[in-house]
Amino acid sequence: MAKAIIDDKATVLAFEKKLIPSDAFLYETNWDAPEQLTPIGLTEKSVRGTISNRLKPAVAGDPAKLNKEVEKANLQRVDACSLSPHADTLVMKFTLKVLGNLSTPSACNNLAFRNSYKAAMEKYISETNFSELGNRYATNIANARFLWRNRVGADQITVKVKDLINPSNSWSFNAHDYRMHDFKHDDPNITNLGKQIADVLSGTEEMLLLEVTCLAKVGHAQEVYPSEELVLDKSNGKGEKSKILYQVDGTAALHSQKVGNALRSIDTWYTEFSNPETTNGAIAIEPYGAVTNLGKAYRTPKEKRDFYSLFDKWSRGEELSSIEDTHFVAAVLVRGGVFGEKS
């Protein structure tokens, strides 16, 4: 008798993200008297720059043409953001919501696949309790990776975390105590915070809501860096701003997406990661290990290390070659997304 073919392809498959940061708002204060916070606003500058882009060979090779080109003023209107002369400390504040229920996709149109996926996820939870991922997310909170460029050159950085559902839980970290690409350490504060996150991801607890406040001593009147807006319509011509910074109701801010990217920069399991001092180090969790500013995908289907190659096997009950591959798959599911197969 012919064997029945079981169709376990889910053409509709989606997972909601489980780490949900808010926008991060920027304030200023003084390191020695941090009680008073003042929102940081944006200022507009009109600057006269020089021509510094690459020129055509015909222009670059002719001194007369080159002189004529560089005489042109490169006039720009830009947004700028800095501390006032009386403040030396940047304060960044955001909230982070953690959700669970990873055993159930938010959308799945195939019962056979849903059952095999659920069994795989429940096995992963029983074996790991999400402790590795919880520890890594907690580390990226403690090391203030979410400051991005504002972290560079900061003399002192303190990160304070408060549990808004259980106010008795709070944590404080000196960000410079933690390396940016190393997630192996024995810090009871990070272990405790990581367990709170892992308990929600594994379904032991229903939800976690954290308030993160970071103080970075950068210096009086120093420039600080909110998110920059992507200007898609550049057809307005001269006179328009060439750089627009992000603000909400007059307060400079970082996009929630940028904060989220920092928190999920935990992938040290890709093939090219070896020495974090000489390579790109920990990268954000992405299905193909994409790092856009480098124009590179660190996880390619050719090597079978991308999310889809690993997920298709793991979700159907196959064992992956390493626990690190399984951690990566679980982290992409925490990130969320639409992962349906073609029919």
Image (cartoon, rainbow, N blue to C red):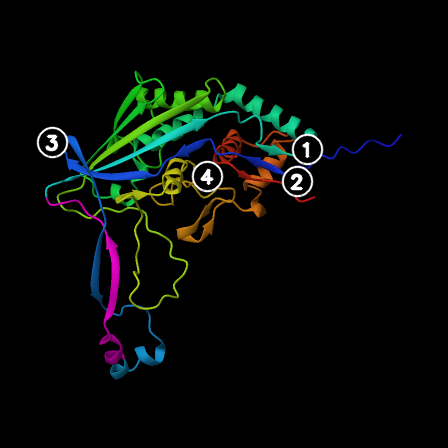
**Above or below for 103 versus 25:** above
Residue 154 location (% of width, % of height): 20, 40
| C-alpha separation, residue under disc 3 versus residue under disc 4 | 37 Å
Q: CA distance from mark 4 to mark 1?
A: 26 Å
Q: CA distance from mark 2 to mark 1?
A: 8 Å
Q: Residue at x 33, y 31 (%)?
A: 141
Q: Quadrant of residue 212?
A: top left
Circle 2 sits in a helix, a strand or a loop, which is it? loop
The quadrant in which the C terminus is found is top right
Residue on which the image places disc 1: 110
First of labels 4, 1 by sequence position: 1
Of callouts 3 and 2, which one flags the residue occurring earlier in the amino acid sequence?
Answer: 2
Q: Quadrant of residue 77?
A: bottom left
Q: Are marks 2 and 4 in contact (CB under 8 Å)?
A: no
Secondary structure under badge 4? loop
Residue 199: % across, % down: 44, 20
Is 333 positioned to the left or the right of 279 in the image? right
N-terminal label among 3 and 1 = 3
Mark 2: which amino acid? Thr
In front of the other: 8 or 270: 8
- Which residue is tagged 3? 32
Q: Could you tell me which residue is drawn at 28 percent across and 22 percent down?
A: 171
With 229 as the anchor, is 309 left or right in this view? right
Q: Which residues are magenta?
A: 66-85
| Image location (x, y in percent) of residue 138 | 36, 28
Which of the pair 214/310 is nearer the observer? 214
Q: Which residue is mark 4?
A: 285
Q: Residue at x 63, y 39 (%)?
A: 12
* Residue 78 highlighted magenta (yes or no): yes
